[in-house]
Image (cartoon, grey):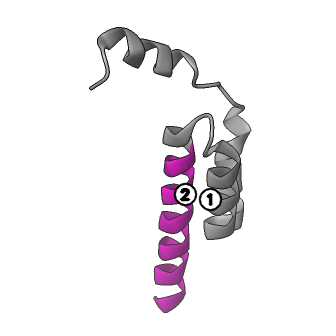
Amino acid sequence: MKTEQEDNEAEDEILETSWAWWLAPIFLTWLGGLIGWWYHRDFNRRKGNRLLILGIVMTASQGLWLLL
């Protein structure tokens, strides 16, 4: 089990990346989310997962839009 100090050190290791990464899943849907996840998977897993989820949501919303 990790101690509080180890958790704090792990949070310090997360690197900040550009906000522009959020544009990839918006414009490229699932592919942009996958690219964003792949880039962030080693040093900022939380942002990578959120980019992937956004890409999936954008794909689903576009699919629903086409069905209407």
| Mark 1 surroundings within 10 Å by alpha-carbon count, few (fewer than 14), some (14 through 19), many (20 or more) | many
Q: Is residue 4 above or below residue 63?
A: above
Q: Residue furthest left?
A: 1
How far from the left and from the top, in percent, is residue 39? 71, 47
Instruction: Tell me if residue 26 can be seen.
Output: no
Q: Is residue 17 above or below residue 7?
A: below
- Where, by quadrant of the figure, is residue 52 drawn? bottom right
| Amino acid, disc 1 | Gly
Q: Quadrant of the N terminus?
A: top left
| Mark 2 surroundings within 10 Å by alpha-carbon count, few (fewer than 14), some (14 through 19), many (20 or more) | many
Q: Are marks 2 and 1 in contact (CB under 8 Å)?
A: yes
Label 1, on which residue?
33
Q: Residue at x 70, y 61 (%)?
A: 27
- Mark 2 lies on a secondary structure that is helix
| Amino acid, disc 2 | Leu
Q: Is residue 57 left or right of residue 13?
A: left
Q: Of residues 29 and 7, which is closer to you in this image? A: 7
- Where, by quadrant of the figure, is residue 16 drawn? top right
Q: Is residue 12 above or below residue 59?
A: above
- Mark 1 lies on a secondary structure that is helix
- Give me the C-alpha separation between circle 2 and circle 1: 4 Å
Label 2, on which residue?
52
The part of the chain drawn in magenta is 48-68
Q: Is residue 5 left or right of residue 1?
A: right
How far from the left and from the top, in percent, is residue 19? 67, 34
Q: Of residues 6 and 34, which is closer to you in this image? A: 6
Q: Earlier in the sequence, mark 2 or mark 1?
A: 1
Identify the mark at residue 8; answer none if there is no mark: none
Q: Residue at x 53, y 15 (%)?
A: 12
Q: Residue at x 62, y 41 (%)?
A: 42
Q: Is residue 58 above or below residue 62?
A: above
Q: Residue furthest top?
A: 5
